[in-house]
Image: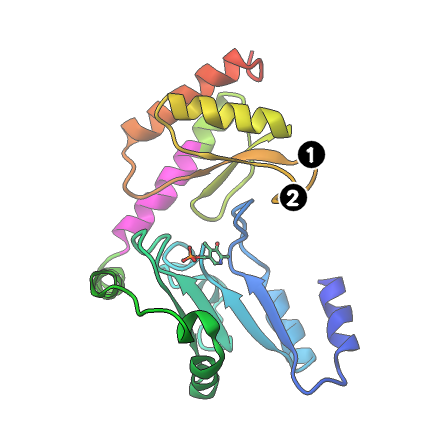
C-alpha cells in the first residue's frame, strides 16, 4: 500500500489514474485489501478496477465478490470476471462498469472485437448460474466448508497450508522439482492438481495449488488428503 500511495502521488499530473488489482490472488487464495485501496483511490482521485475471476461466486456473503466482502458494492469503477471458475467451468467472462466505459471497451477491446461470440449454451448456463446465485447460498456455503475441512485435515496431517479466503488451497513445498514430482504422483493417484514454481510464485515458494469445489463430497476430499499423505511419506516430506 505504501508503494501504491507513492505511485499515485507520482501520477497526480496525469489526467486519469486507474488502480488495477485481483480480487483474490490466485496463488495464495487471499483477498486483496480493497478497503485500503479504495481509501487511497479516494484520496488521490483514482479509479479502481478489480479482476474478480477468483472471487466472484466465492467471496462475500452472497458470492458477489470482494466489493461485497468490503461493503463497497457500486463504488468500484470496473469489475471483470470469468465464467470459467466458480461460474460453471465454461468459457467466457464479463466486464461491468459505467456505460461510457463499456461503450469504449466495445470499440477498443480486441478479444471482444475480433472474436466470435460465446456459444449459446455457455451463455444460457451463465445466465442460469446468476439466477441460482440469487436463489440460495448453499453451494457457496458448501465450498467454504469444504475448503476449511481440507486445510484443517491437511494441516493436522503435517502439511504447511496457507490460510485461504477462497477455493484456493496452497500446499507449500518450497522446492520447485519437488512440486512437479509431487503433482505428477498425485495424478497417478487420480488427483488433478498443479505444482507451481518460480516465476509464477516467488523463488523458494514452490507449492501445489489445490482448487476445492462445492461439487466435492467428504469422500472426495478424504481421498485427496489420503493421496497427499501417501506421497508425502514416500517423498520424505511427512514422517
Ligand atoms: C482465470 C483468470 C483469468 C482468465 O479467465 P479465463 O476465462 O480462463 O480466460 C483472468 N484473470 C484472472 C485473475 C484469473 O485468475
Residue that mark 2 sits on = 199
Q: Identify the element where label 1 is drawn.
A: loop
Task: From the top left corner, tell me how far across and down residue 94 is, in percent.
Answer: 39, 69
Quarter of the image with the C terminus in it: top right
Q: Is residue 174 visible?
A: no
Of callouts 2 and 1, the N-terminal one = 2
- For the residues bearing labels 2 and 1, Cβ distance under 8 angstroms: no
Q: Is residue 40 visible?
A: yes
Q: Residue at x 29, y 53 (%)?
A: 88
Say if 221 sits above or below 163 in the image.
Answer: above
Q: Identify the element where label 2 is drawn.
A: loop
Q: Main secondary structure of the magenta part?
A: helix
- Determine the CA span between mark 2 and mark 1: 10 Å
Horizontal side of 40 relative to 85 (left or right) equals: right
Task: From the top left corner, tell me how far across and down residue 231 is, in percent.
Answer: 48, 17
Residue 47 lies in quadrant: bottom right
Q: Residue at x 43, y 24 (%)?
A: 186
Q: Residue at x 44, y 73 (%)?
A: 73
Horizontal side of 78 relative to 40 (left or right) equals: left
Residues shaded magenta: 137-150
Within 10 angstroms of label 2, few (less than 14), some, or many (20 or more) residues? few
Disc 2 vs disc 1: which is toward the camera?
Answer: 2
Quarter of the image with the N terminus in it: bottom right
Say if 186 sits above or below 148 in the image.
Answer: above
Within 10 angstroms of label 1, few (less than 14), some, or many (20 or more) residues? few
Picture disc at residue 204: 1
Amino acid at each position: 500500500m505504501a508503494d501504491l500511495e507513492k505511485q499515485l502521488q507520482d501520477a497526480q499530473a496525469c489526467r486519469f489514474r486507474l488502480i488495477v488489482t485481483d480480487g483474490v490472488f490466485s496463488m495464495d487464495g487471499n483477498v486483496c485489501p480493497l478497503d485500503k485501496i479504495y481509501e487511497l483511490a479516494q484520496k488521490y482521485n483514482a479509479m479502481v478496477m478489480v479482476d474478480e475471476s477468483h472471487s466472484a461466486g466465492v467471496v462475500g456473503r452472497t458470492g458477489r465478490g470482494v466489493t461485497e466482502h468490503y461493503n463497497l458494492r457500486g463504488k468500484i469503477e470496473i469489475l471483470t470476471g470469468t465464467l470459467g471458475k466458480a461460474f460453471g467451468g465454461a468459457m467466457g467472462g464479463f466486464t461491468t462498469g459505467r456505460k461510457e466505459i463499456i461503450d469504449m471497451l466495445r470499440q477498443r477491446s480486441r478479444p471482444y472485437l475480433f472474436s466470435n461470440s460465446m456459444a449459446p449454451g455457455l451463455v444460457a448456463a451463465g445466465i442460469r448460474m446468476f439466477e441460482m446465485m440469487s436463489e440460495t447460498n448453499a453451494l457457496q456455503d458448501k465450498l467454504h466448508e469444504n475448503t476449511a475441512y481440507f486445510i484443517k485435515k491437511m494441516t493436522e496431517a503435517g502439511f504447511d497450508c496457507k490460510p485461504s479466503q477462497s477455493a484456493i488451497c496452497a500446499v507449500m513445498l518450497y522446492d520447485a522439482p519437488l512440486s512437479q514430482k509431487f503433482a505428477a504422483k498425485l495424478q497417478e493417484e487420480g488427483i488433478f492438481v498443479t505444482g507451481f514454481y518460480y516465476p509464477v510464485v516467488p523463488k523458494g515458494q514452490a507449492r501445489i495449488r489445490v482448487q476445492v469445489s462445492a461439487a466435492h463430497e467428504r469422500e472426495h476430499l478424504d481421498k485427496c488428503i489420503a493421496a497427499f499423505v501417501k506421497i508425502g511419506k514416500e517423498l520424505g516430506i511427512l514422517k
